[in-house]
Image (cartoon, coloured by chain):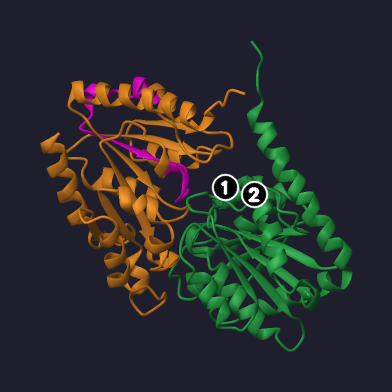
Chain colours: A orange, B green
Amino acid sequence: MEKIDIGRKILSENEKYAFENIMFLAERGKLCLNMISSPGSGKTTILARTISDLKDKIKIGVIEGDIQTDIDAERIRATEAPVVQINTEGACHLSAVQISDALKKLPVEDLDLILIENVGNLVCPSAFALGENGKIAVLSVAEGDDKPAKYPGIFAKSKVLLLNKIDLLDGGHVDFDIERAKTDASRLNKAIEIFPISAKTGEGMANWYDWLLESIQKT
Amino acid sequence: MEKIDIGRKILSENEKYAFENIMFLAERGKLCLNMISSPGSGKTTILARTISDLKDKIKIGVIEGDIQTDIDAERIRATEAPVVQINTEGACHLSAVQISDALKKLPVEDLDLILIENVGNLVCPSAFALGENGKIAVLSVAEGDDKPAKYPGIFAKSKVLLLNKIDLLDGGHVDFDIERAKTDASRLNKAIEIFPISAKTGEGMANWYDWLLESIQKT
């Protein structure tokens, strides 16, 4: 009996499109980042604030991945940034072929940065390359400081970890040991850059912006 | 060329074990609930408090699903409840065969209730029946009131929705419109029971306990 290695075959098809996307972006010298987190950690709020705060410096385009609805894309449209919505209709992660389509719909030549907001899921999206230059993990302090240890995949693979909602730490509304999260994430990934931020108040966002601007320069 | 419907085949294998688990539980008249949420919405804290608060009334056993680590099982062990840890080693949801194994390791005859804590993921676990009598969705108010609309699967399938961390609403630390979440969840699922709770302070937990005790009576 012949054995069919389905898992490998599906991944290769995704990898093929991911490679095409890498080439597409490299030829145009564009930076593309893939934001991954649980639902509700604040990805859309981070995106909207980043676009707004950096609007005089860089042009950002967004690819919004959601299972259903265009609630997030509407929030991005309010910033006047170009945005393409992908509805996965039940699938728990974006795949490279969807990004390939979305890149053709964005005015890529006019952009300095393309930010992909993946489906809210700390597990599955980390296993699927989209052709991005790097992954950005987002973890809100409301989710608990044990998450890097418990869900290591995304922390091991990301260039940046944004520890969001630090405004909730003031007054002790949530228990979250920033040093524990940093230590665990750095153990998984020595090169990871970790920025505690509040996309709500703006605290710490300047460090993230500096990293973004420097990364665009290098691309 | 012959087409092989792999998706269906995998699901059927899971369904076979799920059906065995249903029969195993029904023969013994035991209630088994499958808790599903994003990482960090407070499943383990809810479990630990429920076990502790109800310890003079019912005996609860726990099946802990995690990708890696036994951090959660350790927290449950501290309550002295019997617990079985399943590490999925990367998989984003529990499957029925794992529950079948775990049920054999628990002292089921001595228990009134078996609570399964699924892997932290609001998407994938809702698609895999484990043989449970019902699903319990958990959503923390820190995650945002748009989640029932954006991730409808789990809200459409659950018997109960626990809206956790309502202590964060006091003083306006997070923006979450309880009525919006209730309306959206009820639109997806007319029968869903919704209990706003704080597993940290204990607020609202009595409603959840009443529902649990009544459901055990009915099983």
Instruction: Point out the stretch of residues depicted in magenta.
Output: A102-125
Which amino acid, by three-letter code, is at mark 2? Ser
Q: Disc 1: which chain?
A: B
Residue lying furthest bottom: B56
| Kind of residue indicated by mark 1 | Val
In the image, what residue occupies the spot 47% across and 44% down? A124
Q: In this view, does B1 lie to the left or right of B175?
A: right
Question: Magenta stretch containing residue A108, yes or no?
Answer: yes
Residue A15: where, in percent of width, then height? 38, 27
Secondary structure, mark 2, is: helix
The N terminus of chain A sits in image quarter: top right
Q: Is residue A113 left or right of residue B188?
A: left
Pointer 1 local density, CA inside 10 Å: few below 14, some 14–19, many at least 20: many
Residue positioned most to the top: B1
- Residue B18, label in figure: none
Q: Are marks 1 and 2 in contact (CB under 8 Å)?
A: yes
Rendered location of residue B171, percent (x, y)? 45, 75
The image shows residue A4 at horizontal and vertical percentages of 55, 26
A105, above or below B199, in the image: above
Residue at mark 2 = B126
Q: How far apart are marks 1 and 2 (CA)?
A: 6 Å
Residue located beneath label 1 in the image: B123
In the shown orientation, is residue B91 left or right of residue A190?
right
Mark 2, Cα crowd under 10 Å, few <14 / some 14-19 / many 20+, is many
